[in-house]
Image: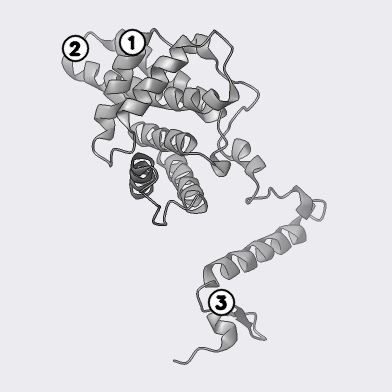
């Protein structure tokens, strides 16, 4: 079938019986726009007092705290971290859980970052280090959840320990979730944080939120250009990490 110029651009053919036919490379976006306009019109017929201005903007990063029940004003600090040796052990448990996927973390860089975070003065975290603290929170969340499963397998009387570790996992998950705008990731540590949040949601069987985060992570990865071939001659480690992040997502 020959395609016209309008069809190749993904435009809609609108007949007299209100029937849309979508073809072309951009047909998906065109279809979603027509569905959104149609839904707004239907809702306005039932309740004229509802203004279309009150409809959340799905493309705005301000919508993500509402969608994922985030509280940007409530942020965790260095004082919420466990002891250094405990944090290191929990991180190792998280990395063991991660081995089923691509290894999208460069371990020497991560452990160097871990040491630097613990040497900073309390509640004196520079902006350049805050993204590493958020990454650490997300790793701790997955690690505590992984250790909780291990205790359930080894010790029947470990209910209190498991419950405590589950609470710690949820605590650090909330810290990581509230400190990052999932819809507006701009750096590799931020995107790594989102992946660990996804792994935590998958481990806790919260699949609806998991797929929502996964969709936004994929959007951020494409926006950052991780789907393109990078110049590995300049920094091959960074290039490999970016490649593994993309394929993990």
Does 185 appear above or below 95? below
Q: Which residue is label 1 attached to?
A: 86
Does 111 appear above or below 198? above
- Quadrant hosting residue 27: bottom right
Q: Which residue is label 3 attached to?
A: 10
Inter-mark Cα distance, 3 to 1:
55 Å
Mark 2 and 1 residues: CB-CB less than 8 Å, in contact? Answer: no
* Whether residue 167 can be seen here: no
Identify the residue at horizontal 70%, vertical 60% (top origin): 40
Front in this rendered view, residue 152 or 99: 99
Mark 3 and 2 residues: CB-CB less than 8 Å, in contact? Answer: no
Which badge, 3 or 1, comes first in the chain's sequence?
Answer: 3
Name the element at disc 2: loop
Front in this rendered view, residue 56 or 192: 192
Mark 3 or 2: in front is: 3
Name the element at disc 3: loop
Identify the residue at horizontal 36%, vertical 37% (top origin): 202
Mark 3 or 1: in front is: 1
Q: Position of residue 140 (x, y in %)?
A: 39, 21
């Amino acid at each position: 079938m020959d395609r016209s110029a309008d069809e190749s651009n993904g435009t809609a053919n609108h007949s007299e019986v209100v029937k849309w036919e979508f073809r072309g490379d951009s047909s998906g976006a065109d279809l979603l726009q027509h569905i959104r306009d149609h839904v707004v019109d239907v809702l306005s017929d039932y309740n004229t007092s509802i203004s279309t201005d009150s409809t959340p903007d799905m493309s705005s990063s301000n919508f993500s705290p509402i969608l994922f029940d985030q509280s940007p004003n409530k942020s965790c600090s260095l004082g919420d971290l466990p002891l250094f040796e405990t944090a290191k052990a929990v991180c190792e448990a998280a990395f063991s859980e991660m081995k089923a996927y691509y290894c999208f973390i460069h371990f020497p860089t991560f452990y160097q970052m871990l040491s630097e975070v613990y040497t900073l003065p309390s509640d004196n975290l520079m902006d350049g280090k805050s993204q590493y603290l958020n990454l650490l929170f997300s790793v701790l969340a997955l690690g505590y959840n992984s250790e909780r499963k291990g205790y359930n397998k080894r010790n029947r009387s470990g209910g209190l320990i498991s419950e405590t570790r589950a609470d710690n996992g949820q605590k650090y998950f909330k810290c990581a979730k509230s400190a990052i705008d999932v819809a507006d990731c701009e750096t590799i540590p931020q995107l790594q944080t989102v992946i660990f949040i996804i792994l935590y949601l998958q481990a806790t069987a919260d699949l609806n939120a998991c797929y929502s985060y996964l969709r936004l992570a994929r959007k951020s990865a494409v926006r950052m250009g991780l789907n393109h071939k990078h110049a590995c001659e300049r920094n091959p480690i960074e290039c490999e990490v970016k490649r593994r992040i993309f394929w993990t997502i």
